[in-house]
Image (spheres, rainbow, N blue to C red):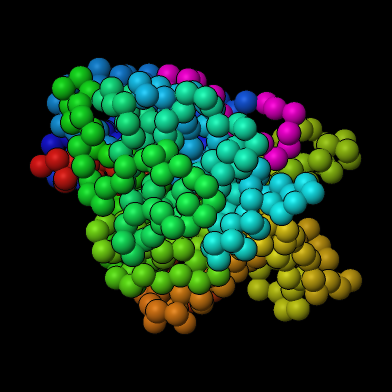
Amino acid sequence: MKSMGIDVGTTTISAVVMDTQDKKVLESKTVPNNSFITTGQDWERIQDVSVVIAQAFQVIDELLARHADIGSIGLTGQMHGIVYTDEKGLDVSPLYTWQDGRGNLAGDKDSVVDEIRKRCNLTVASGYGVVTHIYNQKNGLVPEKAVSFCTIGDYLGMRLCSRTRPLIHISNAASLGFFDGKNARFDSGKTELMNVNQDMLPEVTADFDRLGEYKGIPVTVALGDNQASFLGSVGLQENVLLLNMGTGGQISVLSDEYFEAPGIEARPIVRDRFILVGSSLCGGRAYAILERFLRAYAIAAGAPDQCQYGIMEELALKGAGKEDAMSVETTFQGTRADPSLRGAVTNLSAENFTPEGLIYGVLKGMSAEFYRMYEVIRKGTGIQAEHIVASGNGYRMNKMLQQISAEMFRAELTLAPYQEEAACGAAISSMENIT
């Protein structure tokens, strides 16, 4: 049986057609998500919804034209961000992405994030959908015709099935903030404290419900991309860590226990089960920032403007295993718990301050961010890493990072079986729950 999964990511839109019985990818397609809108605000990160949806429909229709026997369509996409919808189910705003910084803007008063922490005793991050909505509400930015909001994956489902109101899975609902994960619903008490109109909140389901049909094919509710990636890479195996290094970075592990701590979220994945997640805001971008730095120097020195990753990999091998190595903190964009935190380079000496030392140090710093999160989970739950599955281009394209992580976690590391993990997870869960 064939199933299609589509992942509406921040920088790309990917789709796969899978033989779900043999768990084999028959065809995949990825296109750039060229939808960011340039604004005059450095903190604002928004995308053009019409461009996103048009690109997604084009990919879906192309694959459907080549695979007439697809039995279901599963959806996933970037979490946290929101798009407002009107009473007809159409978008009336841009997509406010997970990278949007309006929740951290202070001005003469507390930022929205700080106000929520003080009034609700709740730690949330800028970019979380309800945080974005509260900021917009305070500043008169909620569209006049808006009646609800949802993630971009949910909105794609609405358009495919001609729905007028969003129905969102607990995996996406939890990503918006103000969500009671234990009871699988938004926390009405805390949202009321922030004057959120309860009618604006989308309907939530704990099941992989059918949204409707597109061209006669059942479409299931969208999953959060983190949960979809976990299903596509790990399934529901216990004591297996999923390390994902992409635009951001995430560490995830399955748990029957609802556990949260500073920097660790309990995200619903299926009814009464969770994945415990730590998120690195910089993630694989830390290595990209270093490449940009080295490329800029090379150009200034008269070298051609070309990618430095190949040279960096060679130098990283030379930097491995050195005693008294420099230490690099790769929190260049802060953390979820402390956005003001910045990176650092310490333990510098005349001997270790070398290009290979810096490159290796950044790779080790990226892995160390994950390991600190794992230690919080291990101490709080007793979960032990028996195996590591690594996903994302940050791992696939960097063997040294794979080696560093395996050594640091003292566990065997293998790459995820599929490159488009989130789309595959959406396809597999969709077909299993349709049949």
Residue 90 position in % (x across, y down):
40, 22
Query: To which quarter of the image does residue 200 belong?
Result: top left
> Is 266 placed left or right of 315 in the picture?
left
Q: Kindly identify the residue that appears in the image at 59 percent across and 66 percent down.
A: 369
Query: To which quarter of the image does residue 339 belong?
Result: bottom right
Residue 417 position in % (x across, y down):
33, 51
Q: Kindly identify the residue that appears in the image at 28 percent across and 64 percent down.
A: 273
**Count of marks placed on residues:** 0
Q: Which residues are magenta?
A: 38-54
The residue lying toward the viewer, choosing from 241 and 191, is: 191
Above or below, 48 relative to 211: above
The residue lying toward the viewer, choosing from 429 and 46, is: 46
> Is 226 placed left or right of 235 in the picture?
right
Residue 346 located within the stretch drawn in magenta: no
Residue 6 seen: no
Residue 48 located within the stretch drawn in magenta: yes
Query: To which quarter of the image does residue 180 belong?
Result: bottom left
Above or below, 402 relative to 212: below
Above or below, 309 relative to 30: below
- The quadrant of the picture occupied by the N terminus is top left
Residue 136 position in % (x across, y down):
60, 37
Q: Kindly identify the residue that appears in the image at 70 percent across and 65 percent down.
A: 329
Residue 176 seen: yes
What is the residue that sits farthest to the left in this orientation?
435
- The quadrant of the picture occupied by the C terminus is top left
The residue lying toward the viewer, choosing from 369 and 201, is: 201
Q: Kindly identify the residue that appears in the image at 16 percent across and 46 percent down.
A: 432
Above or below, 339 relative to 302: below
